[in-house]
Image (cartoon, helix red, strand yellow):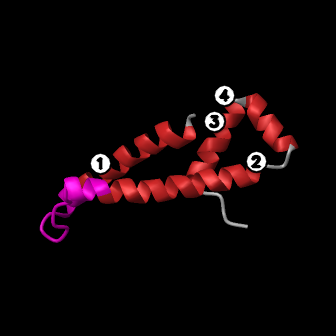
Amino acid sequence: MEQLGKYGFLRRDYLKNHRNLIYQVMLLQDTIGEHLLEVDKAAREREEMILKQLEEKEPLPDKEADQMAWVRAANQHRTIAEEIILKELIYV
């Protein structure tokens, strides 16, 4: 079985705290693990796609020339991607 990642845990916590009935039903039907793995996988794939789109739209600066600018831009891209994923896949 695959290892559950960050987005799977976020989804589990959301279901547990805000959609407890759905969480309990999935737990009783033994489908929660599969659901969390699917959400985690979909979120990681979506993150990769969003990051590629962002980099095409706003290329990262040259890492060798200005490492701090590169880190700032890369972190900004990752934050944007994460916000989109949370709204689209985790908190629904």
Which residue type carries mark 1?
A: Gln
Q: Which label's residue is closer to the chain start, 2 or 4?
A: 4
Residue at the extreme right of the image, as rendered: 28
Q: Which label's residue is closer to the chain start, 2 or 3?
A: 3
Q: Which residue is mark 3?
A: 14
Q: Which residue is mark 2?
A: 32
Magenta span of residues: 53-71
Label 3: how many residues lie within 10 Å, few (<14), some (14-19) or many (20+)? some
Marks 1 and 2 sit apart, C-alpha to C-alpha, by: 32 Å
Foreground tag (2 vs 3): 2
Q: Which residue is mark 1?
A: 76
Q: Are marks 1 and 3 in contact (CB under 8 Å)?
A: no
Q: Secondary structure at mark 4?
A: helix
Q: Are marks 4 and 3 in contact (CB under 8 Å)?
A: yes
Marks 1 and 3 sit apart, C-alpha to C-alpha, by: 24 Å
Q: Which label's residue is closer to the chain start, 4 or 1?
A: 4
Q: Secondary structure at mark 2?
A: helix
| Percent coordinates x, y for residue 63 in the rendering | 20, 67
| Percent coordinates x, y for residue 70 in the rendering | 22, 60
Q: Which residue is mark 4?
A: 18
Which residue type carries mark 2?
A: Ile
Q: Are marks 4 and 1 in contact (CB under 8 Å)?
A: no
Marks 2 and 4 sit apart, C-alpha to C-alpha, by: 15 Å
Q: Residue at x 73, y 54 (%)?
A: 34
User: In which quadrant is the N terminus drawn?
Assistant: bottom right
Which residue type carries mark 4?
A: His
Q: Are marks 1 and 2 in contact (CB under 8 Å)?
A: no
Marks 4 and 1 sit apart, C-alpha to C-alpha, by: 28 Å
Q: Residue at x 59, y 44 (%)?
A: 10
Foreground tag (1 vs 2): 2
Residue at the extreme bottom of the image, as rendered: 64
